[in-house]
Structures are given as structure tokens and as C-alpha cells.
Image: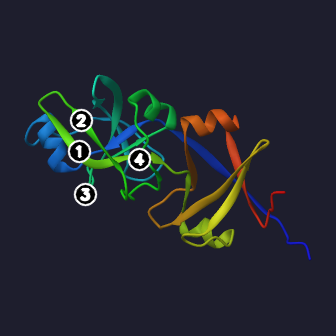
Amino acid sequence: MSSKLQIMWIPVEVSGRHIHLSNNDLNKLFGSGYKLKKLRNLSQPGEFACEEKIILKNGDKKLTVRIIGPARQHTQIEIAKSDADKLGLNPPRNLSGDLHNSLQIMLVGPKDEIVLKNGLILAKAHIHCDEKNAKKYNLVDNQLVKVKCKNYIFSDILVRVSSKFELAMHIDVDEAIKAGIEKGEIVKGLTID
């Protein structure tokens, strides 16, 4: 018995290396009461790229990352595998927000530096989906799908459904280069031989 393929087009956004800071870490790195300066809004409602950047440091290896606002409950850094290689580290590939087994890293700001005990991850590709599109395309929260981009197929992509989201798939720079993509399509029922 063959399964029916259901296809929808989805914007694919490439996330560069970035950090989400907690208020506590923001105050340590930039000074008490510091307010982030918005550079531009991002596609997900309420999120924005900031003018500010910080330095990640592992021994003598350094990498500059942009801050994404607003402040979160926990500091988290999302980098690509090529970034991790530059730092000489091997962080786990986790979904944003999952800091299980995440790595320690030093953060250097203009006012101070801190050793973050955990929080460095390789961001796992995922889909943000609003409730209207979830209903339209029969997608549910925490569903795993495949996404075809040109001749490349991403497997086991987690769908996150929320009224706070705008429809978009997020991948990192390395994944974008590998797939050579601009937009993808969710293909439900697709089997890979």
C-alpha cells in the first residue's frame, strides 16, 4: 500500500551563530541595567537581532557571536559545526531550549567575562509553525517530518506549533551550504530508500 504525499511550501531561514542572554548574564557582560539595541526584527514575533556582539572563548580560540533579543530565562549559544571546530569543541546537536549535555564556554563582553557552565549547542533544524498552518496542513506539535530542499532531504525535523510562531524552518549555515537551498517543502509520507 502506498501512502499519499502531502506537500506544502515553507520558508527556510538560515540562522547564523548567535546567543540568547539571560538578564543576569547581560548585566554582568554589559553592566547593570544595560538595554540591548535592536538592529532588526527577526521573522519570529518578538525576536530581534541586536547591535551588540560578544566573544566566545575556549583557551586561545575565539569566535564573535551576535546577541538575539529579548533576554531569556537561560543563556544559550547556538553555533554551527564549523564554528565548533574553530573553537575546538564538540557540543551536542540539540533543539533550541534543550541544554542537556550542553558545553561550558567563556563569554567576553565589554564590561566583564564569565564562564558559562552550560549552554553551548549545535542548533538542531526545526520548524516553527503557527496554528492556522498546522491545521491547514495537518501538522501537530512535536511531529517529525522530512523536508526536501532541491535534491537534499532533511530527516527527523521537529515541528513546533504555537500561536506565537510564524511558519519557517530554521537551519544553520553548514546545513544551508550542504543543501544549497532557498526554500523547502514538507513531504509527509515520503520514504527514503
Indicate which label's residue lies in the foreground, 3 or 1.
1
Task: Give the distance between the C-alpha atoms of the residues marked 1 and 4, in whole angstroms.
Answer: 12 Å
Q: Report the Cα–Cα distance between label 3 and label 1.
A: 14 Å
Residue 190 in picture, x, y percent from top left: 80, 62
Residue sitting at the far top? 60
Q: Residues within 10 Å of mark 2 (few under 14, many from 20)?
A: many
Q: Quadrant of residue 90?
A: top left
Which residue is tagged 2? 107
Pointers 3 and 2 in contact (C-beta within 8 Å): no
On screen, residue 18 above or below 126: above
Q: Which residue is mark 1?
A: 116
Q: Nearer the viewer, mark 3 or mark 4?
A: 4
Residue plotted at (13% across, 42% down): 27
Assess whether mark 2 and mark 4 are in contact (beta carbons under 8 angstroms). no
Question: Badge 3 local density, few (<14 within 10 Å), some, or many (20+)?
Answer: few
Return the disc, 3 or 4, that comes first in the chain's sequence: 3
Q: Position of residue 54 (x, y in %)?
A: 27, 31
For the residues marked 4 and 2, what is the alpha-carbon distance in whole angstroms? Answer: 14 Å
Q: Are marks 2 and 1 in contact (CB under 8 Å)?
A: yes
Q: Quadrant of residue 60?
A: top left
Going from N to C along the chain, the mark reached first, 3 or 2, is 3
Disc 3 and disc 2: Cα gap in Å? 17 Å
Residue at the disc numbered 3:
73
Q: Nearer the viewer, mark 3 or mark 2?
A: 2
| Residue that appears at 33% across and 24% down | 61
